Amino acid sequence: MPPPADIVKVAIEWPGAFPKLMEIDQKKPLSSIIKEVCDGWSLGNHENFALQHADTTNFYITEKNRNEIKNGAILRLTTSPAQTAQQLHERIQSSSMDAKLEALKDLATSSRDITFAQEFINLDGISLLTQMVESGTDFGDMLSFTLTAFVELMDHGIVSWDTFSVAFIKKIASYVNKSSMDVAVLQRSLAILESMVLNSHDLYQKVAQEITIGQLIPHLQGNDQDIQTYAVAVINALFLKAPEEKRQEMANILAQKQLRSIILSHVIRSNRSINSEMAHQLYVHQVLTFNLLEDRMMTKMDPQDQAQRDIIFELRRIAFDVECEPNNSGSIEKRKSMYTRDYKKLGFMNHVNPAVDFTQIPPGMLALDNMLYFAKHHQDAYIRIVLENSSREDKHECPFGRSSIELTKMLCEILKVGELPSETCHDFHPMFFTHDRSFEEFFCSCIQLLNKTWKEMRATSEDFNKVMQVVREQIMRALNTKPNSLDQFKTKLQNLSYTEILKLRQSERMNQEDFQSPPIVELREKIQPEIMELIKQQRLNRLCEGTCFRKISSRRRQDKFWYCRLSPNHKVLHYGDLEESPQGEVPHDSLQDKLPVADIKAVVTGKDCPHMKEKGALKQNKEVQELAFSVLYESDEYLNFIAPDKHEYCVWTDGLNALLGKEMSSELSKTDLDTLLNMEMKLRLLDLENIQIPEAPPPIPKEPSNYDFVYDCN
């Protein structure tokens, strides 16, 4: 007979005694279970004891989390969190330096547990730690453990960041400003500053007064990538929380300090590989930099503004090398006619008043800025494009003005200008760190590509949208190769001619071709179950290998991980917390927690997940929601996941649905099914190449009038 669902078999340790095997009844109050354990070892005052997991976490067991105890778990009887917090509170005030150091070390470890953290904070522990920091008497390991404990306690979100004094901020900032500082202290100090800036508007202003970009940049020039990551994170936080009117000013300071070239030489082009957290911070910096363009992108041109109209006059002057005519030269009608002719040659839609073309937002004035930059910094290419198209009479001219406006709008969509950075994305492009005016240079390469593609397609004005679709595809394919420089990007574009795009499309279409004749459809239907079974086995094999998932907090990004994998017999999910990201597979025996597949009731995704409904999760953006899924295994118990990327999300949701006997409906399954099915179809139809397969089977002939032709065996 299997044990009742509410009974859990565990081992309980106590220092100096043999472990005790016992059954825990989950219906009983936790206090009575602790009393029973204490009585077994003849220990009085059971209210001073508690149970905790005997693993690397040492987390306390409470009424809230007791349902997480699994069969076979090893627990430890220990002092209660309130008593432990009281003891540590006293020990960290010891006059003995050695005793104080050991106490701070224990505090840094214990503070990871929210149960202990709550008790320590109730004793005004945060204030005690901040006073220790402000006093300036601690240094080295002692200061490092103090700051580590502070970071862990604050990470639980129990205490508001708004409560800290200027003296504390000054002290933390001083650790960052010192040229020689313990690495651990520097890391914690940068993490604290980032959290202060991100979580409190008042603290942002105070931190901004204490720390300057110039003081953060030297930390980027070192060899420690963790320090570099924290430094970029603080710069990004200051950038993100700066008032809109100050962001451009801050961008100018970053340019003066040559932040871009320092990141390029000391991070992107260093000999070390870039870890995922640094890649995320570089992505955030890239997004924040491009978001500076939003103001111009959403600004309409004022047709009455002479300064703005002068930019259009300058485009005309550079293209046709004409001097500004004096006001009395020729009649007004003659000058208007000449302007209209030139504006038509420049490819504006409104030949009389081209300023009207820039009233569409997006791209607004940003398009005009790009055109002027191209005309001034790539003058030969600009003049060649304009004159080449203005002299054509065969209706195949490429309108430079209209093209530039639509291209600028497209580039803003591709780079998501104006959108907040994703919490999980790390898709940065090295080439955008190679030039101070990278967006403008990006535009210049793309407008020349557009003109080239227009000619290759022999397009007319009716084909404008088709050309823009091809150009978008060319740009996206080139960006996906992650070129290291703008020159490499140009080379990629040169190789992606319209002919090459047609070949790629044809190749992809061949791979995805769907034959519609009844015999082929019938064959596909016969093969499809075999292919789906193959995909199912692949998904389950991937679940058996397991995946490392990051724990994401709305308060600050953390390098906290947990791992989950399916047992080889497909009956149990093994999972557990990790101290760091693993280099390979994590063995089953190192994962403490188990979830029988038979107990899984449902799989929910996206905004239906419990961790996406919590208050803190509302701050997460849409991309995090798209990677979230949860496993319901009891009436109200969930195992919550946030996949590292879309591929892993599809693999896990497919695998879990397959375990439950449900349909695998992810985008990846559809893609895999199409790919494998079409490949299998082509292999089976290989012998029938160039043979016309009839739509319907041939008719059965009529019966003959006699069967005299049949051989009589008798």
Image (spheres, rainbow, N blue to C red):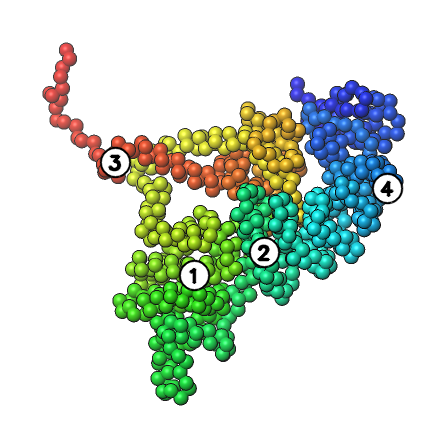
Mark 3: which secondary structure? loop
Q: In the current view of this chain or complex, which residue is farthest to the top?
A: 714
Instruction: Determine if residue 416 is in view.
Output: yes
Disc 2 residue type (three-letter): Leu
Question: What is the CA distance from the residue labelled 1 to the residue labelled 4?
Answer: 64 Å
Disc 1 residue type (three-letter): Cys
Examine the rendered structure and indicate whether residue 381 appears above or below residue 183.
Answer: below
Mark 1: which secondary structure? helix
Q: Determine the residue positioned at 26% across, 67% down.
A: 394
At which x and y percent is residue 497? 34, 53
Give the labeled residue for mark 3: 689
Q: Determine the residue positioned at 58% across, 58% down.
A: 258
Q: Assess disc 1: are there few (<14), some (14-19) or many (≥20) residues with their C-alpha within 10 Å of its C-alpha.
A: many
Q: Determine the residue positioned at 76% across, 31% down.
A: 52
Examine the rendered structure and indicate whether residue 177 appears above or below residue 559.
Answer: below
Left or right side of 312 for 96: right
| Contact flag, marks 1 and 2 (Cβ < 8 Å) | no
Question: In the rendered structure, which disc, 3 or 4, sits on the residue that comes first in sequence?
Answer: 4
Question: In the rendered structure, which disc, 2 or 3, sits on the residue that comes first in sequence?
Answer: 2
Give the labeled residue for mark 1: 444
Q: Which numbered circle lies on residue 413?
A: none
Disc 4 residue type (three-letter): Gln
